[in-house]
Amino acid sequence: MFKLGLLTAAGYLVPKNGLSQVASGGLPVSPPTTPFVEMMPVPPIKETLDGLDPPPKVMPQAGEGRTRPHQALEMFPPVRFAEVHQREALHSFHPELPMQTIWGFDGMFPGPTHVCRYGEPYLVRNHNDLPEDNGGFGLPSVSTHLHNSHTPSESDGFPCDFFEHGQFYDQHYPNVLAGFSKQFPPNGDPREAMSTLWYHDHRVDFTAQNVYKGLAGFCLLFNEHDTGDESTGFRLPSGEYDVPMLFADKVFDPEGLAFFDLFNLDGIIGDKLTVNGKIQPFFPVHPRKYRLRLLNTGPSRFMQLALSDTRRPQQILPLMQISNDGNLLPRPVEVESIHLSVAERVDVIVDFSESAGRSFVLLNRMEQINGRAPTSRIMPVGASDAVMRFDVVLPPVADSPPLPEHFYDLPPTNANSPEVVARRLFRLDRLQGQWTVNGRIFDCETALVTPREGTAEIWTIQNTSNAWQHPVHIHFEEHQILTRNGQRPSVVERARKDVTRLGFGETIELFIRFRDFLGRYPAHCHNVVHEDHAMMMRFDIVP
Amino acid sequence: MKTMTRKTALAALAVAPVFGYLATRKTTETKPATRPIRREPFRAGYFPNVAMQTHEGKTVRFYDNLLKDKIVVINFFYSRCGGLCSPVARNLAQVQKLLGGRVGRDIFIYSISLDPGHDTPAVLREYARNRGIGPGWLLLTGRPEDVELLRRKLGFTDPDPVVDRDKSQHAGIVRYGNEALQRWAACPGEAKPEWIAKSILWMDWPKAMKKGA
Ligand SMILES: [Cu+2]
């Protein structure tokens, strides 16, 4: 019935059987599935523990895959703990497709949502219980990354710090603001607060396969302003009105099983869009405000999202964008659409209060026909792909108050400040199918650059190609874009980020600090197929 | 490889390209609790079983004789190549040393010529002799259309058609895999040989499937 309504609307065509785009490059075309037949699930919140047995130790202990001591375990003793088992499980992407094996944190895709607070150090014991003989894509060897937490190197999930089947790894998350050790002691710079994080497998050369198989989930970080309670602080929609949404595009073989092209170097585009593990689900909402936390997990797709009224498709519901890569902006910004490269996150406030009885389709308007880059054509509303649908069918309830006019100021980015001690150029290039950064091939053992702790640098990143685009992710600290192709970017893009899209032939200049912890971190393309083919570099923060 | 056959039948999540059969399953069919996948047809169905000539002068079938049930390392090259081929070949020679006796036993290296018209088995034999290419590492040539099919299926293509046609700009990657496990990945051919060797060993048999286990 829902489907009919969409198809008969003037000029509006939600393809009956999924996306309008045809999978290219000899990939299978997924079997048809009916849109909007299953409700979008919300991943459960991870239960925490008061301790672990055996208790975490500074030095790696028996059975642990960690190779380096925790550098801040004693400084930030964890007050909450969690134990996560990465294992295989059966999952249904759609009622018309078969149950199939996925890999999930606690056997779930998406994994459970970790809920953290600043000032409450947290420790997650990750167990690798994945099957040794999985057959097909995925390698049962993992490195679990919390993107983009201010985490000591040994807990970051550096790609080459992987651990094997049967091993565990204690990941220590101090949940502390950047700058706590020197610039803003003892609690850090309040302008560096983060909100929406996600965790995922980061195994070197196998990230795309392992994440595609299901190893990804959310982590929400609250503080005294963004409290997780809509009656306090910024009073943002909370509880059931705070909804994480994980996008992943997939392609299914004729039997209906998730298919991963193991022989692809360019990037993988799925012809089915999933949200929280379901193909084109629906989500019933109350007529009130919601906070939607949007995350694109790829593997390679660039998205441009908009909400369109099913009865008046050309009518786009405005969105209040409140964050950029999980960081609250200086102030909410009204937008018509949201751009999401792989690993980017945007939180939006959607106000359904005037829309009781109506339905809105979340559209992806970005045309993309291969894994290299989008065509950059924004598809007309009628030809866009339906990601999911919101139905404003639940009874009226109390709404959260109007949005505050101000969140966090941006940390200063004065290029002439004495804290800036280096300017570096990174050229992303490709030599006969091999990705290079400044002509160098990624090597787990060798740092390309070694920034000094307690300093800032200005990095210029260049995409030398007019055929490829790359969402570049720098671990550990948020950065701010100073210029994009010499121009000052929009207010949203100037705000703190950890993934920056490099379009065709683009050059960006960014400001980044290196504070508090030491050790190795990666910076890499988050088109995970590029990443797995070594589009990565290592930087070491040194004293 | 008797243990393999039993194991492969048990394997649950083979997700490889499907050839030659279409879904006949109705959507109303009851969902099975688990779906053991017939892995064999996926495997044999994907890789072209074309005839190739080795530098030792033998004719072999690509899937049956070279891939099936083996850990393999594959790259493309040609003898008159003035670019990446030499550094990659030097790297692979190091890799062969690093993997020790396993190359030729259950790990095999294949370098496929992109210039089959010129690279006859005799030319390749000469190339192998000059570079000390040892047992377990085969240089391969075949009909141009078969080489091209392999290049596409094994993912050594470039999305830019001009680059793709120019063999002097061919993909310099090294692909490695465990065919029985359907485990595949790739790394840059100019990566350190120690790294390439380590990567290949990620394809190793799970304990229960190790030879002699
Ligand atoms: Cu990229």
Image (cartoon, coloured by chain):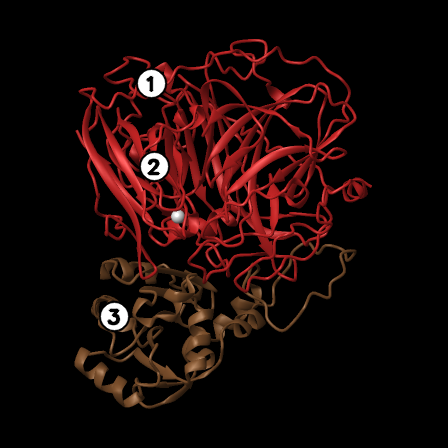
Amino acid at dot 3: Cys
Cβ of mark 2 under 8 Å from ligand 1: the answer is: no
Pointer 2 chain = A
Q: In this picture, is B24 found above or below A116?
A: below
Instruction: Let me know if marks 2 and 3 both belong to one chain.
Output: no
Residue tagged by mark 3?
B85
Cβ of mark 3 under 8 Å from ligand 1: the answer is: no
Image colour assigned to chain B: brown
Image colour assigned to chain A: red
Residue tagged by mark 2?
A485
Q: CA distance from mark 1 to mark 3?
A: 49 Å
Between residue A144 and residue B158, name the one nearer to us.
B158
- The mark that comes first in sequence, 1 or 2, is 1
The reply, left or right, for residue B141 in relation to residue B18 is left
Q: Which image quadrant for residue B118?
A: bottom left
Q: Quadrant of the N terminus of chain A?
A: top right
Q: Position of residue A517 (x, y in %)?
A: 26, 28
Q: In this picture, is A322 found above or below B81?
A: above
Circle 1 Cα neighbour tier, 10 Å, few/some/many (<14 / 14–19 / ≥20): some
Mark whose residue sits in front, 1 or 2:
2
Cβ of mark 1 under 8 Å from ligand 1: the answer is: no
Amino acid at dot 2: Asn
Q: Quadrant of the C terminus of chain A?
A: top left
| Element on which disc 1 rests | loop
Q: Would you say the residues marked 1 and 2 are in contact, meaning their CB atoms lie under 8 Å apart?
A: no
Q: Would you say the residues marked 1 and 3 are in contact, meaning their CB atoms lie under 8 Å apart?
A: no
Between residue A42 and residue A479, name the one nearer to us.
A479
The reply, left or right, for residue A430 in relation to residue B210 is left
Pointer 3 chain = B
Residue tagged by mark 1?
A411
